[in-house]
Amino acid sequence: MRVRLAPNPWRAGGLAPAPAQWACSPARALLLSAKMIGQKTLHSFFASSAAAGPAGKRHLHCKGPGPAPGDSQGEQVPPAKKAKEEVAAASPPLSPDQLERIRRNKEAALLRLAARHAPGGLAEGWKRQLGTEFAKPYFSKLMGFVAEERKHHTVYPPPEHVFSWSQMCDIKDVKVVILGQDPYHGPNQAHGLCFSVQKPVPPPPSLENIYQELSTDVEDFSHPGHGDLSGWAKQGVLLLNAVLTVRAHQANSHKERGWEQFTDAVVSWLNENLDGLVFMLWGAYAQKKGSSIDRKRHHVLQTAHPSPLSVHRGFFGCKHFSKTNELLKKSGKKPIDWKEL
């Protein structure tokens, strides 16, 4: 059935266009035109359309489209999410060159961060890898504490020796880690390496016991006549105290001020980024500090502390030095020359 539309009175009479509020969709125009023809004709038209049922699928709406077919809820994707999905779909995977540039930019940013906050004396390689520590509140507070201590007390070791353990071996070249607790607190002893003392200071009792164990464990080892262990440090043996400064003649006077958190970060970086390290943990304190070491990834040797108070509880006869070299060889690494002192 066809509906004949009445002439447009505005167009036919040369009148002005219909007001904007009268404008609508073709269906609305149809409805208006039909009214001009007559109510009966209009009713007949819609009655026949409704009788056509779903097959006709004719929907007349003036206010715009409803839900899309098959979308009973009328849900729409949020614009922000849609834009994000479009960008992700349009973005190609990063090329190797782009990934390398990102890596270099990240490394440069870490260097800038380290340069602003890192303490003097820490070697560059260690600064790069530990740079995020220096911006943390605890480290700033720690540096302030040590500076105040030096103003009012004698503090060991001297500032230039606090980080000497980092100056003798790059962080990525570490092969062996020996953990200590607190620097020696006597004059001219501490110089940044645990168990080690500067020449010509005589070796302390713990170091004497270490030399005694070496003489029975390593062929041709003889007492070097001094206590400076720099020769080991230069071969990749990290001699790291948990606390790096101390007030003169007051053992453990700088404990729980932040050094433990920093040296934990050092151990954590080595544990997570290197493979096949040998950790020598002597005594309960060192063993607790090294409790998080991945023992499937690294080798851990534990025994009593070489102090005269505990050396007979397992340190003598532990053969840690020869065992360390055997483990290094199995990992394809050059063994340590323990005689090179």
Image (spheres, helix red, strand yellow):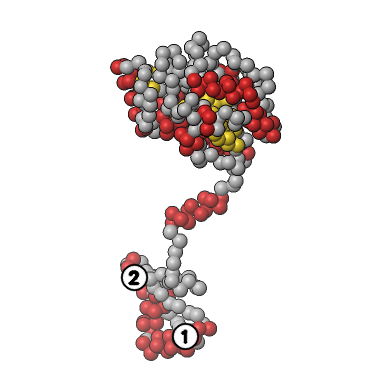
Q: Amino acid at mark 1?
A: Ser
Q: Which numbered disc, 2 or 1, marks the residue closer to the eye?
A: 1
**Where is residue 195 shown, x and y percent of the image?**
50, 22
Which of the two residues, 330 or 312, is positioned nearer the viewer here?
312
- Residue at 58 percent across and 21 percent down: it is 212
**Where is residue 16 shown, x and y percent of the image?**
34, 66
197 vs 298: above or below: above
**Where is residue 227 shown, x and y percent of the image?**
53, 16
Which of the two residues, 79 or 52, is positioned nearer the viewer here?
79
Q: Amino acid at mark 2?
A: Trp
Q: Which residue is mark 1?
A: 49
| Residue at the top extreme, as displayed | 200
Which of the two residues, 228 or 37, is positioned nearer the viewer here?
228
Q: Is residue 205 visible?
A: yes
Instruction: Identify the secondary structure beneath mark 2.
Output: helix
Q: Are marks 2 and 1 in contact (CB under 8 Å)?
A: no
Q: Which mark is residue 22?
A: 2
**Where is residue 261 shown, x and y percent of the image?**
42, 34
Instruction: Identify the secondary structure beneath mark 1.
Output: helix
Residue 116's quadrant in the figure?
top left
